[in-house]
Image (spheres, rainbow, N blue to C red):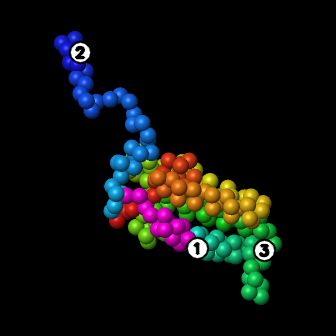
Amino acid sequence: MATDDHPDVPEPDDTWSDDPPADDAEWEIDELPESGPGSLAPIWARGLARVIDLFIVGLAGSLVAQVSGLIEVVDDEVVSQNPTLAILILLVVWALYEVTGTASGGRTVGKLMLGLRIRSTEVDQAPPPSKSLVRWLLPAIALLLPIAGLQLAVLLIVYFSAVTNPRYQGFHDRFANTLVVRNR
């Protein structure tokens, strides 16, 4: 209600409210287009992009480990004198690939190939390096677990939690406040 004493205060109407939306998840989904650029990326496309990215990371990590002498191929078998260090090199390669790709434009090679990008939930921009690191860190922690079956179980939980989320966010996206959307 504008008065002579307070001319800057707008008059309330039926749509004006200081209260935030009752359910942030629904409100944010409503703000996204249903299809086309900016809409939520389908689960199958996200999964395929992840497979492409893991192939690239595995190849690059193996190459770095082989060049540095941490692994070698003997009689068609990969042999390592220090498997822990080889895994750490793989994690570093993965971090550099994933975090820089996510923070620099919201894209890794896999996401670029499938027309997807990662954005912050708050603004339609690539997440900053800190959120990109958090997004990478949650699945990466699984690889530090001592039992292979436990590693796989944690990775499946992190990634497949997106299936039941209305915004298709896995736990890594929820912790980092990111969304994966279509770019085209």
Q: CA distance from mark 1 to mark 3?
A: 20 Å
Q: Residue furthest bottom?
A: 75
Q: If you read the primary sequence from the N terminus, does the residue marked by circle 3 or circle 2 appear first?
A: 2
Residue 81, magenta (yes or no): no
Q: Which x, y percent locates residue 87?
A: 71, 65
At x 23%, y 15%, the residue is 6
Q: Which residue type does callout 3 highlight?
A: Ser
The residue carrying pointer 3 sits among few (fewer than 14), some (14 to 19) or many (20 or more) residues within 10 Å by Cα, namely: some
Q: Which x, y percent locates residue 29?
A: 39, 49
In the image, the segment drawn in magenta is 39-52
Q: Of helix, strand and loop, which one carries label 2? A: loop
User: In the rendered image, which residue does mark 2 sit on?
Assistant: 6
Which of the pair 165/58 is nearer the observer? 165
Q: Which residue type does callout 2 highlight?
A: His
Q: Residue furthest right?
A: 81
Q: Of helix, strand and loop, which one carries label 3? A: strand
Q: If you read the primary sequence from the N terminus, does the residue marked by circle 1 or circle 3 appear first?
A: 1
Q: Residue furthest top?
A: 5
Q: Of helix, strand and loop, which one carries label 1? A: helix
Q: Quadrant of the N terminus?
A: top left
Q: Which residue type does callout 1 highlight?
A: Phe
Q: Kindly tell me whether residue 106 is visible in this rendering.
A: no
At x 63%, y 58%, the residue is 157
User: In the rendered image, which residue does mark 3 sit on?
Assistant: 80
User: In the rendered image, which residue does mark 1 sit on?
Assistant: 55
Q: Quadrant of the C terminus?
A: bottom left
